[in-house]
Amino acid sequence: MALKNIRLEVMKSIESKVDGFIDKYLIPVEDIWQPTDMLPNLQDDSGFDQVHQIREEAKELGYDFWVVLVGDMVTEEALPTYESWLMDVEGVEQHPKDGKQNGWSKWVRQWTGEENRHGDTLNKYLYLSGRINMREVEKTTQYLINDGFDIGTGRDPYKNFVYTSFQELATNISHKRVGQLARKKGNKMLAKMCNVISGDEMRHYLAYREFVKTIFEHDPSEMMLAFQDMMKKKIVMPAQFIRESGQGIAEAFENFSNAAQRLGVYTTYDYIDILKKLNTYWEIDKIRGLTDDAEKARDYLMKLPDRMTRIADRIAIPKDQHTFKWVEPNGIL
């Protein structure tokens, strides 16, 4: 049987469990927080006092901080691209059959609904802060959606779920650290926003890593090879595709990444730690019945963290701040 057909059969066999994943890892609309819960209520006169508070507290946050917060927000705002990508994965059927919605498409839509609140929340905060050139940020968001999103997974569900497992934990770490920095500067409102967003990302990470664990039970050798392939290519964060008007993609991401590393928000060591966590949770060292190629893939994955650490130890992070159009030079504190 062709690999594509095997993957499709595995996706169909797991589909019956998806409603259980939704109940366990996602929260009903009526019960989950909404952006308005985190932001000033402008239907109330006291809401304008809170806006003033946001603007005053924003003065305590440095240039790199704003660059990272903008990059995180733009990444969240490009959600239409991510949804269209996931809806095209093998086994995810967009249209109901015999009046029944495909379980995987149900997951993708409800996951999207939760993720959609993140960019909305941070966008409103940045607008109210008065520290950001929102028009330039909005152009960056539009470019990110226009340019598309190709992470080298094709329609392969195995590779895509490795990616989402990795990426969801990475965003959890980034949002959590930004929130911690905000709290240290006395910005409790922004700290709370980032904290609850990071909580959502953690739930999503737990779900996607469970998808992969389940696939390992059904098709261990091909899942191992898919995991290896993704790590050889390197997990490309969505922010890698951001750009400012008039600049290339690579330049903007490198400068954004340098700011994140200087702040300690998301570093190469975090990337390595995520790989270690996935290796451990998926218990790849204990999986039996692998093909020869899959055994070699397992060996590669087990040795990779140490190899990456040796390389990371030799990398120096530039100390110079790049001036982004998103954050005006007079915004440097």
Image (spheres, rainbow, N blue to C red):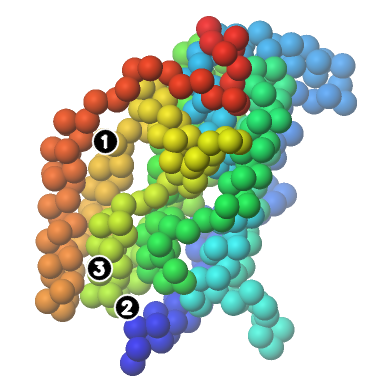
- Residue 197 seen in the current view: no
Camera-nearest label, 2 or 1:
1
* Circle 2 residue: 218
Residue 43: image location, x then y, percent = 87, 26
Q: Earlier in the sequence, mark 1 or mark 3?
A: 3
Q: Amino acid at mark 2?
A: His
Residue at the far bottom in the pictured view: 1
Distance of label 2 from label 1 (alpha carbons)? 32 Å
Q: Residue at x 66, y 45 (%)?
A: 142
Observer-nearest of 126 and 25: 126
Could you classify mark 3 by the number of other residues whose Cα lies within 10 Å: few (under 14), some (14-19), or many (20 or more)? Answer: many
Residue 221: image location, x then y, percent = 23, 75
Camera-nearest label, 3 or 2:
3
Circle 1 sits in a helix, a strand or a loop, which is it?
helix
143 relative to 320 in the view: left or right: right
Distance of label 1 from label 3 (alpha carbons)? 23 Å
Q: Earlier in the sequence, mark 2 or mark 1?
A: 2
Q: Residue at x 43, y 18 (%)?
A: 321
103 relative to 54 in the view: left or right: left
Circle 2 sits in a helix, a strand or a loop, which is it?
helix
Where on the picture, by quarter, is residue 212? Answer: bottom left
The image's mark for residue 269 is 1
Residue 186: image location, x then y, percent = 54, 11
- Residue 132 seen in the current view: yes
Observer-nearest of 203 and 330: 330
* Circle 3 residue: 224
Q: Amino acid at mark 3?
A: Met
Q: Residue at x 37, y 65 (%)?
A: 159
Q: Amino acid at mark 1?
A: Tyr
Residue 2: image location, x then y, percent = 35, 89
Work out whether 107 lies above or below 6. above
